[in-house]
Amino acid sequence: MHAIEKILARASGKKEVRAGEIIQAKVDFAEVNDLYLQSIKSFYEMKGTKVWDPNKIAFILDHYAPAPSIQSAANQKSMREFVKEQGIKYLFDINAGVCHQVMVEEGIVWPGMILIATDSHTTTHGAFGALGTGVGATDLATIMLTGELWFKVPDVIKIEINGKLQTGVMAKDVVLHILSELGTDVAVYKAIEYTGSTVRDMSISERMVLCNMAVEMGAKTSYIIPDEKTIEYVKSRADYEFDILETDEDYKYSAEYIFNVDNLEPQVALPHSVDNGVDIQKTLEIKVDQVFIGTCTGGRLEDLEIAAEIIGDNKIHKDIRLVVIPASKEVLEKSIEKGYIMTLVKAGATITSPGCGPCLGTHQGLLAPGEVCATTSSRNFPGRMGSTEADIYLVSPATAAAIAINGKITDPRYYIKNAKVENK
């Protein structure tokens, strides 16, 4: 069996499970964000009175943080009241940050667990060897009521990534390239295991980016074999006992793909699909109105670090708005301590409170018709960040910073010392 199958077998009380099998499994942790008040409504519609375990549920107010409308404020108020009434242990309010980052920082993610949330990018937690996946309000209400959920055991595909990334090329570039090669339906209701020398060399944050965007290939979940780097990180945060479930040597993947990234260029996903990725050299003259650095694929500490490094003493272009949103309160605090925020502010950036911001098109930097945005977020569908007549380009944090200086799509290696590029 694959390690993911072993996680599901253990949670369902079975010796083994196989792809395609429908099982009922115990969930280790459930998480609700502020888009899903319906989870509470469904809980009561199911005649729920007390949640299954108040210590294993979190509510996170991140998508509308702070509330930009009366309706979102009312929804958050209802959630706070539910948390208090039910004695739920974890409430991450509007000052906490993006759920996928906050859960990890708070030590609620560990290898071998099953984490279910009302957010499709919960695949992020495969970076820790956890089975993380997103569901709708009704399924989440079922978990709050029973602590269990049904699963169809997924096939697993393996994506092996080898080679040494060039300076200025990040995990975001890698996954945009993979998406451009494999498309958005290569892993529909399958699990993706990322492996290879490049993945092993990546930091925890960069691995989270890979796993986060697995859902953009249709994946149910993702997985990276926990190594010493993972274990060290988890033990520094989490107070849980866990073991590492290993994939059997004779396990047969449903598909295997191999990539070499030695010569990978920075990537840009053109409007209006995440699999429209191209080498940055094909996009250099495209002018941009707004740059957004933030979200669960570009707002972590090392993302702000490279943005600050590239921007340095430069000012952002006179025709550019640079919006920067740290992924969490912890990221904000450390970015202030290290001076990254001051560098960005001096350059002309607008800094807002930790959260999802304009990624989902609700507030903190929406786009007008005809505008162009380069963003470190995960989706570039029409209307995702405001007007359906705006164009969204997906880029890495390094590329975003270079664009902010130059006013048009720009190779970040131009601004990085010793990087192998001479033009902008």
Image (tube, helix red, strand yellow):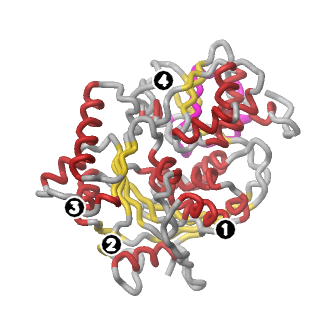
The residue at which mark 3 appears reads as 145
Residue under the image location 64 percent in, 64 percent down: 232
The stretch in magenta equals: 272-294
The residue at which mark 2 appears reads as 25
Does dot 4 land on a helix, a strand or a loop?
A: loop
Instruction: Describe residue 246's horizontal placement relative to residue 143 as left or right.
Output: right
Q: Nearer the viewer, mark 2 or mark 3?
A: 3
Percent x, y of residue 295: 52, 39
Instruction: Describe residue 262's horizontal placement relative to residue 2 as left or right.
Output: right
For the residues labelled 2 and 3, say whether their Cβ atoms are less than 8 Å apart. Answer: no
User: Within the magenta stretch, is there residue 289?
Assistant: yes
Q: Nearer the viewer, mark 2 or mark 1?
A: 1
- If you read the primary sequence from the N terminus, does the residue marked by circle 2 or circle 4 appear first? 2
The residue at which mark 1 appears reads as 228
Percent x, y of residue 274: 53, 43
Vertical comparison of 31 with 150: above or below: above
User: Within the magenta stretch, is there residue 252?
Assistant: no
